[in-house]
Amino acid sequence: MSILQKIRDVFYPRNLTCLVCKRENFSNSSVCDGCNSILPFNDKSICGNCGRATAYPTEYCDICKNKPTNVDMARSAFEYLQPISTLIMRYKYGGEKYLREYFAQKLMPVFLKYIGYADCIVYVPMTKSRIKQRGYNQSKVLAEEFSKLVEIPVVDALEKTKETYSQVGLTLKERTQNLKGSFKVVDRGAIKGKRALLIDDVLTTGSTANAVAEKLKSAGAEEVICLTVASVNFKKPIESDEKDRKSDSLNEDIL
Ligand SMILES: [Zn+2]
Ligand SMILES: [Zn+2]
């Protein structure tokens, strides 16, 4: 992590400026009232399985119907739309690690409403070279922050053993193939017979969550529940100014 990132992480004047618009903030929250009113909270009808926003409540959305997964249930606090998508980009690529606190707070009501309990928290591991490049593993950092709120331990159950390449333009089958063999169980005992809560920033296609869950279950995990800050709703058109950022994110290894 660069010195600048470290300084910003320590000294960023939280709550004095809004996390989203960065203007002076007079609300009690770290997001000003104006921005808060336009946040894409995922609190309307959702798919009972993947937790993505749907037009009406359903047990299995069109994506889930055709796609068996090892994830028992997924939920997310927001839809992956502006301004949350930009906030996540800043957290992931902009070194704005302090955003983990806000994200962890927003996961809390979703956890309480739909999930309730878990034996341990897991995260999506990253290769050492990727951590070095980015400064931190955003999934792990968020998992640790959330762990403090719910007092459920984070376990280092998995390691990422090989770098996965861009998932852009790959079919679902190819994505799965791309991820195959990239995760390794390193602590079987921490997972066996457990209800594990997988924490990540975005649920995109769900391929990564599925690959992680598959490994955890092969190590004896009883259940794998996924909780993310946001989930992509493929039915909603992506705003044009977001397309570039979106393809950036699709270039990543977190799909
Ligand atoms: Zn604001
Ligand atoms: Zn679904």
Image (cartoon, grey):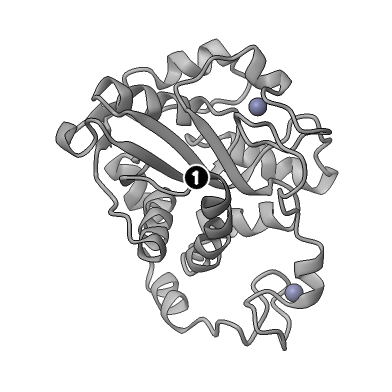
User: Does residue 104 appear to the left or right of 247 in the view shown?
Assistant: left
Name the residue rendered at 41%, 65% in the picture. 149
User: Does residue 71 appear to the left or right of 239 in the view shown?
Assistant: left
Visible residue check, residue 149: yes
Q: Helix, strand, or loop for circle 1?
A: helix
Quarter containing the N terminus: bottom left
Residue nearest the viewer, comparing 71 with 116: 116
Mark 1 belongs to which amino acid?
A: Ile
Q: Where is residue 233 drawn, in percent x and y?
A: 73, 35
218 lies above or below 121: above
Q: Where is residue 197 drawn, in percent x and y?
A: 40, 42
User: Does residue 138 appear to the left or right of 67 in the view shown?
Assistant: left
Visible residue check, residue 182: no
Name the residue rendered at 57%, 43% in the picture. 202
Name the residue rendered at 32%, 51% in the picture. 132
User: Does residue 255 appear to the left or right of 159 in the view shown?
Assistant: right
Residue nearest the viewer, comparing 143 with 163: 143
Q: Callout 1 environment at 10 Å: few (<14), some (14 to 19), or many (20+)?
A: some
Q: Can you tell me which quadrant of the image ligand 1 is in?
A: bottom right
6 lies above or below 175: below
Label tally? 1
Q: Where is residue 95 drawn, in percent x and y?
A: 48, 62
Quadrant in the rendering for residue 21: bottom right
Quadrant in the rendering for residue 239: top right
Q: Is label 1's Cβ within 8 Å of ligand 2?
A: no
Residue nearest the viewer, comparing 216 with 185: 216
Name the residue rendered at 58%, 61% in the picture. 106
Instruction: Report the residue marked by disc 1.
Output: 115
151 lies above or below 34: above
